[in-house]
Amino acid sequence: ILNVEQSPQSLHVQEGDSTNFTCSFPSSNFYALHWYRWETAKSPEALFVMTLNGDEKKKGRISATLNTKEGYSYLYIKGSQPEDSATYLCAKYSGGGADGLTFGKGTHLIIQP
Amino acid sequence: KAGVTQTPRYLIKTRGQQVTLSCSPISGHRSVSWYQQTPGQGLQFLFEYFSETQRNKGNFPGRFSGRQFSNSRSEMNVSTLELGDSALYLCASSLGTGRGEQYFGPGTRLTVT
């Protein structure tokens, strides 16, 4: 994998259902993996920053896992609510050089009542 | 604590002109990063400033430049505007370690005609 890739590109989920999506990234030169939530007409908001292989983080109904050796992270949302509708972005930080934060194109999540 | 502010919020320019965008970070944050968001490309890293020095730079032409002042406020300049420069420009501030989350401003929507 050469770039940060997210799948699926979009997702429709029924209210109350749980869901998950994937962020894949080059495993070389890994420093940190960021997750952001971007709601329409608002600014991206940080969810998690993960640095260690095997890291698991949780914030309310949202959790994330990290595998730096194989280059992927999963974001889970339990019991989806309408306010979870947003674009979820992941970004890899490679620790300097010309990279900064390299973002994936996001997963657009729509929660249907 | 006041959030990240960006001015102006909207801007319309014509091809060949230049533009300056401003970003005021959260108090105490020394790092300011700039990103360009276009529908097809997603969020792309422009550059990062830390303590008045450009620390990282993305793959953008030299027409894109920036600077940071002693109070950590940052400006981004685009010279000789092209139609393809039409985008949402976001800045984000952080403590600058790469392991910490970034706090995004509301963005400046630039339209080049």
Image (spheres, coloured by chain):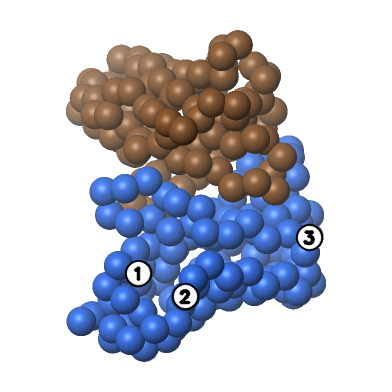
Q: Closer to the observer: label 2 or label 1?
A: 2
Asked where in the image residue A40 lies, by quadrant, the reply is bottom left
In percent of width and height, residue B88 lies at: 34, 39
Q: CA distance from mark 3 to mark 2?
A: 31 Å
Q: Looking at the image, do the residues carrying marks 2 and 1 touch, with CB atoms under 8 Å apart?
A: yes
CA neighbours of label 1 inside 10 A, class few (<14), some (14 to 19), many (20+): some
Q: Looking at the image, do the residues carrying marks 3 and 2 touch, with CB atoms under 8 Å apart?
A: no
Q: Which residue is mark 1?
A: A84
Task: Please state, as top left, top right, bottom left or bottom right, where the N terminus of chain A lies in the image.
Answer: bottom right
Q: Colour of chain A?
A: blue
In percent of width and height, residue A24 lies at: 61, 70
In percent of width and height, residue A65 lies at: 64, 74
Would residue A20 appear left or right of A79 to someone viewing this image? right
Element assignment for label 1: helix
Chain of the residue under label 2? A
Q: Which residue is mark 2?
A: A61
CA neighbours of label 2 inside 10 A, class few (<14), some (14 to 19), many (20+): few
Which is more toward the observer, A101 or B58? A101
Q: CA distance from mark 2 to mark 1?
A: 10 Å
In percent of width and height, residue B65 lies at: 52, 20
Callouts 3 and 2 on one subunit: yes
Chain of the residue under label 1? A
Q: Which residue is mark 3?
A: A28
Going 24% across and 29% down the picture, which residue do you hit?
B10
Element assignment for label 2: loop
Q: Colour of chain B?
A: brown
